């Protein structure tokens, strides 16, 4: 069964099945939590996209929970420090992990020192947001759409250049996955940062990049980059007038994500309360506007929905790593 949701940037996505009626005794149990502030552990530095989204959500969940939410940044070791801090916390709902594709999917695949098992060592609360990548090329390139770029790259026999933010970065893995799915090759040119990689496409030093949307959309608006498509599913519309890459490469999907995870053993009634509070938060206009300005699309659902998405994300990332011959360090 296909559990992938239909997602629209303006409407966002909230699966409201989490808001069904609970038995009276469960309401009584739920009402006892939370009794003190809740901690959101962010395995990234302050000011990062994960930190920004985490703080936006924390602000909007405070009212439905009736308690403050404190953001605690625990950056380092590709996110492993913060994730381990959350994993070893008490499973009482007062310490939650603002998880992301970088710390949960990529880090265990590329960092030998990371030993946690994403699907086994945590309770998955809910997805929070999806972060689409966008395919952009230098405007001087004689291509108008995704099919043109693929045809151009094939005609050059691997002599086109793909920029990235470095080996193992989101743009590197997304680009590898796209090449594998579309059946062409480009020379990988890694840079020290996402902005440097995107700048290389603007200048024409490289030909294209598949990068997180916030890094490129401003340059698209100013005409310094040409937007060819986004990396979400065909039925998703995260960016006005941008087609899905899956329109040209059927089945292709490779976006970042942010979700809430908890130490193993979270009481079910606490998880239900969290999902209800998140559903309320994601319907607030202030949150939607903030998400849009940060290139994020609201996405929430059940623990099983999250597990299904994470399983697919791990598998497609593993394939991208194998396609690029990247070895764990």
Image: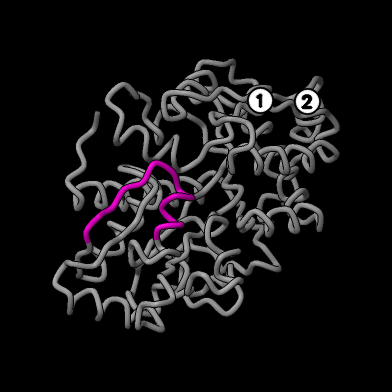
* Residue 116 % position (x, y): 38, 25
Choose between 204 and 95: the one closer to the eye.
Answer: 204
Mark identifier at residue 34: 2
Q: Which residue is mark 1?
A: 93
Q: At 28% from the left edge and 56% from the top edge, which residue is drawn?
A: 176
Q: Is residue 137 magenta?
A: no
State whether residue 226 is above or below residue 111: below
In the image, taking residue 167 as reference, residue 298 lies left or right, namely: right
State whether residue 22 is above or below residue 159: above
Is there CB contact under 8 Å for labels 1 and 2? Answer: yes
* Residue 148 % position (x, y): 32, 82
Mark identifier at residue 137: none
* Residue 63 % position (x, y): 85, 39
Residue 199 makes an appearance in the image: yes
Image-quadrant location for residue 7: bottom right
Dot 2 crowding, Cα within 10 Å, few <14, some 14–19, many 20+ = some
Dot 1 crowding, Cα within 10 Å, few <14, some 14–19, many 20+ = many
* Residues shaded magenta: 187-200
């Amino acid at each position: 069964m296909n559990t992938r949701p239909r997602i629209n940037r303006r409407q966002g996505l909230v699966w409201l099945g989490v808001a069904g009626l609970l038995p009276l005794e469960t309401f009584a149990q739920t009402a006892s939590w939370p009794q003190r502030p809740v901690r959101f552990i962010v395995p990234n530095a302050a000011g990062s996209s994960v930190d920004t989204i985490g703080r936006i959500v924390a602000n909007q969940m405070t009212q439905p929970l009736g308690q403050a939410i404190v953001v605690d940044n625990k950056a380092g070791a590709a996110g492993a420090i913060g994730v381990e801090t959350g994993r070893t916390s008490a499973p009482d709902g007062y310490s939650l992990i603002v998880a992301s594709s970088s710390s949960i999917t990529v880090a265990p695949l590329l960092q030998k020192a990371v030993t946690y098992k994403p699907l086994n060592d945590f309770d998955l609360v809910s997805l929070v947001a999806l972060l689409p990548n966008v395919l952009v090329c230098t405007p001087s390139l004689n291509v108008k759409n995704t099919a043109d770029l693929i045809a151009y790259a094939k005609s050059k026999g691997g002599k086109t250049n793909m920029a990235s933010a470095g080996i193992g970065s989101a743009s590197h893995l997304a680009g590898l996955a796209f090449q594998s799915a579309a059946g062409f090759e480009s020379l990988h040119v890694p840079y020290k940062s996402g902005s440097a990689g995107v700048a290389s496409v603007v200048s024409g030093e490289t030909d294209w990049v598949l990068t997180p949307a916030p890094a490129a959309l401003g340059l698209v608006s100013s005409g310094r980059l040409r937007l060819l498509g986004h990396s979400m599913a065909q039925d998703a519309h995260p960016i006005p007038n941008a087609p899905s890459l899956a329109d040209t490469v059927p089945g292709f999907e490779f976006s970042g994500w942010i979700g809430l995870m908890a130490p193993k053993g979270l009481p079910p009634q606490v998880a239900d309360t969290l999902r209800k509070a998140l559903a309320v938060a994601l319907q607030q206009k202030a949150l939607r506007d903030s998400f849009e300005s940060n290139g994020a699309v609201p996405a929430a659902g059940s623990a099983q929905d999250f597990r299904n998405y994470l399983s697919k994300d791990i598998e497609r990332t593993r394939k991208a790593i194998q396609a690029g011959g990247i070895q764990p360090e």
